[in-house]
Structure formats: C-alpha cells, structure tokens
Image (spheres, grey):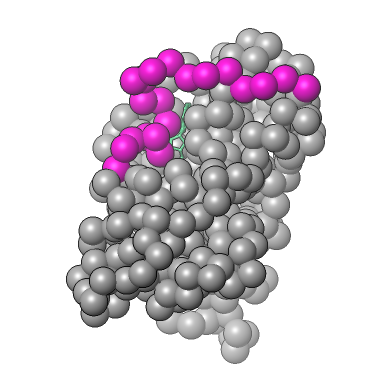
C-alpha cells in the first residue's frame, strides 16, 4: 500500500479509500474482514457465500444454532432478503440507518446461505449508520453477514485491538475506524404480524420503539432461546464478575459509575449513553488487569441502562 495512513500491519488497516477497496476485494473473493459499526466491530463476510459463512462460524467458534445479522445499505436492499409488513417498514424508516436489527420472515427468493439463518424461516436485518460500514456495503455490492468480531461467548469488541485480542491468530484483516460510538450491540426486534417483540435490548430503547409504533412490545415465549444473545451466560470475561458493588475487595478490579470512582469509571457524571459506549472496553481492561476478579458499580435500570444491565447480568454468570 502506498498511502502512509492506510497500512498498520498485515491485519489492521486504517480507514482510507485504499483500505476499503482492498477489504471489498477480500469480501468478494470469500474472505473475512473485521469492520467497525456504530455499535461494535463486526466480522463480515458475503452472506450469499456458504464457504465464507462457514469461515465466520469457525473463526468465532460459534455454535451453529446461532444465526447471523445481515447488514444492508438501505430498506430497498433489505426487501430483497426479507418480507417487510407495515410495522417493519415503519420501524426501518424511523431508525435506519442505525442500531436497530429487525427480524422478519425470509423473502421467498432470499439469496443468503442457509447457515446465515441457521435453519430459521426468519432473517435478522440491519442497516448500519457507520460511514465505514456503509462504504464497504456500497463498494463491495454485497449483503454482509456480520456477527460481533469476538470469539463466541466473549466480550464484544469496540476497538480494533479488542478484535485482535479476542480472535488472536484467527484475526482477519481489520478496518480500523477507532472506537465504536454506541459501544453496545444493536437492539433486536422481531416482527410478529402486527406486533413486535424485543429479543435483545440495546441502544434503541423500548420507549423509543413505543413512541414510533404507538404500541407496547409483546412478551417473549418463556424458555425459547431465539437470539442466543439471550443465553444466560454471554459476553463473559474470563474472570468472576460481581455486580452492584460500591467498594472493591482487594483482589477486585472495580468498574465504577458516577460517585463510585473505581479503577476506571463508565461515566463520572452518570451519563448512561457514555457508560454504554465504554462498557465493553472496561470489561476488556478489567479482564486484562492483574486483579483476579471484577466488580461493577450499580447502573440505573432506565433507558439504555436496561441494555447495560442486561449485558452485565450475562457477563456475571
Ligand atoms: O450491533 C450489532 O448487532 C452487531 C454489529 C456487528 O452489527 N452484531 C451483533 O451480532 O451483535 P451477533 O451475531 O453477535 O448477534 C446477533 C444476534 C444473535 O443473538 C442471534 O441469535 C440473533 O442476532 N439473530 C440473528 N438472526 C436471528 C433470527 N432470524 N431470529 C432471531 N434472532 C436472530
Ligand atoms: Mg455477539
């Protein structure tokens, strides 16, 4: 590569025109690329290429019952893959591009590889707002399947360094766009005829969904794990995690919030959006520290605090 900014090493490349072209070429030939979105870094591949999808599952060590989100440039593209009723269109028009994943019935001629949906009749679609991911979608002209770019069950990556630390020798080319703004995975909503169900809380809150649709979300069917982000243990650091801690034990790394200072603080002035954006980075730091255990300060259970507490609960199992 000739541009001085385009090349860091064999894997990580900064965001630049040449890097996008190289990444698109890699994807078109069935390769993987780690790419930032506004939520977390994704591990992207051509969703219509079965071998490339198998490589995602292998790289993540992901159980094959766990389906992938397909990223599209806009609603028109999404309609080639899934069936959008009025409610789905309403949500897409209000929240796309952005951190909302919509689960809809698969279109009859949906071209994605069967492994993407892991045998389900539905497909999870998302139109990301991050300019780098948008450029990659445009430049590659592909629909990109992309789970979070971490080993299955591990902490989601919000920087290129996290991707490398989690995937180790399996790390593919990374487009390094710096830290992700939102820092917590997209809200997942499943369309159920005229109703919707929240499968995973995220940056788009239940109140925002309600305001858009003028109706409340319906409750899920108990015990049916449809989004494995719903598995009790997920996003787990390798160390024990204690929640609602106001003080650290001597062997604990304390992740603080507001007045609970901690070894690092998610948001000194109790801003929940800031806390969400720093959550996974804090868990990565705590996991890499010399302390044997991790403690986390209480986080309010409103707005995006619901998603933060959801991830913390799974991290503590
Ligand atoms: O913010 C995000 O959503 C990030 C970025 C990279 O876009 N992606 C992400 O992907 O978090 P992943 O694979 O880590 O989580 C996707 C979740 C999984 O829990 C999966 O079970 C669920 O989406 N999912 C995928 N397809 C589904 C479907 N057809 N029905 C229900 N859940 C589905
Ligand atoms: Mg994930």
Please determine whether, in this image, residue 279 is positioned above or below residue 80. below
Is 253 left, or right, of 98 in this rendering? Answer: left
Q: Is residue 215 magenta?
A: yes
Please determine whether, in this image, residue 152 is positioned above or below residue 125. below
Q: Residue at x 52, y 19 (%)?
A: 219
Q: Residue at x 63, y 58 (%)?
A: 273
**Quadrant housing residue 258:** bottom right
Q: Residue at x 58, y 80 (%)?
A: 6
**Quadrant housing residue 221:** top left
The front one of 264 and 172 is: 264
Question: Is residue 111 shown to the viewer in this render?
Answer: no
Q: Position of residue 80 (x, y in %)?
A: 65, 26
Q: Position of residue 87 (x, y in %)?
A: 73, 19
Is 240 left, or right, of 91 in this rendering? Answer: left
The front one of 175 and 243 is: 243
Question: Is residue 264 shown to the viewer in this render?
Answer: yes
In the image, which residues are magenta?
214-233
Q: Quadrant of the N terminus?
A: bottom right
Q: Residue at x 43, y 48 (%)?
A: 311
């Amino acid at each position: 590569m000739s541009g001085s900014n385009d090349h860091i090493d064999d894997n990580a490349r900064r965001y630049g025109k040449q890097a996008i072209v190289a990444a698109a070429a890699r994807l078109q030939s069935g390769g993987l690329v780690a790419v930032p979105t506004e939520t977390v870094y994704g591990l992207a591949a051509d969703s219509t290429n079965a071998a490339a999808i198998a490589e995602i599952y292998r790289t993540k060590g992901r159980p094959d019952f766990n389906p992938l989100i397909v990223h599209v440039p806009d609603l028109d593209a999404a309609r080639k893959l899934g069936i959008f009723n009025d409610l789905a269109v309403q949500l897409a028009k209000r929240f796309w591009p952005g951190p909302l994943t919509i689960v809809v019935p698969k279109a009859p001629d949906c071209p994605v590889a069967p492994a993407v949906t892991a045998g389900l009749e539905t497909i999870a679609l998302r139109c990301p707002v991050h300019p780098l991911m948008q450029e990659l979608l445009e430049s590659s002209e592909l629909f990109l399947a992309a789970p979070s770019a971490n080993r299955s069950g591990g902490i989601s990556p919000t920087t290129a360094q996290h991707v490398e630390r989690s995937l180790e020798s399996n790390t593919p080319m990374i487009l390094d766009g710096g830290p992700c703004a939102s820092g917590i995975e997209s809200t997942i909503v499943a369309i159920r005829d005229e109703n919707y169900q929240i499968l995973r809380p995220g940056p788009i809150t239940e109140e925002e969904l309600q305001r858009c649709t003028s109706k409340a979300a319906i409750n899920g069917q108990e015990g049916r794990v449809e989004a494995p982000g719903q598995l009790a243990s997920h996003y787990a650091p390798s160390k024990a995690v204690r929640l609602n801690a106001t003080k650290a034990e001597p062997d604990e790394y304390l992740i603080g919030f507001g007045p609970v200072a901690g070894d690092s603080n998610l948001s000194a002035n109790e801003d929940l959006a800031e806390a969400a954006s720093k959550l996974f980075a804090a868990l990565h730091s705590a996991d890499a520290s010399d302390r044997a255990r991790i403690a986390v300060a209480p986080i309010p259970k409103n707005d995006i605090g619901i998603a933060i507490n959801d991830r913390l609960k799974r991290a503590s199992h």
